[in-house]
Amino acid sequence: MIAALTAAAASAASITFSLPVWAMFVGWIAFYTKGLSVKAGIENQACAGVGLFFGLCSALAISSLSPVTGLNIVLPIVVFFSALIAVSLRGLPFMNNLSCYFLGLVTWFAAHLEYSLQSLLLLFNECYRGLGWWSATWS
């Protein structure tokens, strides 16, 4: 019941601020990927945020290099290095949630926003809004 009320309130806030409601659910997914505590939820959200940043960097690299090399060449190269970095981070003692890194990357590309810090912060905020740790602390 608490989780459902939290989801309803978060979606209402998303609509109020004209933010993508689907991105809110990324925060919920991120929360449930690893651990069910406030600490794990914050760590998961941080990994998703880093994934969003990787997505922005990847998109910038693709848009900058594709006129020079062509999309057929640059896209696989950028995807390779993005995946290589994300997979390498799973060995860290903390912030090692590979699923959340990829959730962030997917969220960036799915949103089709302009390449800016403002867009990055907007998506991070929306994912954070959906973070399910509030319901975990109340249940």
Image (cartoon, rainbow, N blue to C red):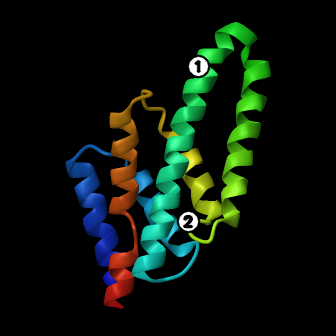
Residue drawn where x is 67% and y is 52% of the image: 86
Judging by the rendered image, the residue that carries numbered circle 1 is 63
Return the residue found at the far bottom: 139
Is 101 rendered above or below residue 39? Answer: above
Q: Badge 2: few (under 14), some or many (20 or more) residues near its Cα, within 10 Å?
A: many
User: For residue 12, what is the image quadrant?
Assistant: bottom left
Name the one closer to the observer, 16 or 69.
69
Judging by the rendered image, the residue that carries numbered circle 2 is 95
| Element assignment for label 2 | loop
On the question of residue 1 being in view, the answer is no
Name the one closer to the observer, 14 or 44.
44
Return the residue found at the far left: 16
User: For residue 11, what is the image quadrant?
Assistant: bottom left
Q: Is residue 5 left or right of residue 93?
A: left
Residue drawn where x is 32% and y is 78% of the image: 134
Residue 62 image offset from top left, x and y in percent: 63, 24
What is the three-letter code of the residue carrying label 2? Met
Q: CA distance from mark 2 to mark 1?
A: 29 Å
Residue 77 image offset from top left, x and y in percent: 77, 30
What is the three-letter code of the residue carrying label 1? Ser
Name the one closer to the observer, 13 or 84.
84
Residue 13 image offset from top left, x and y in percent: 23, 57
User: For residue 25, what is the image quadrant?
Assistant: bottom left
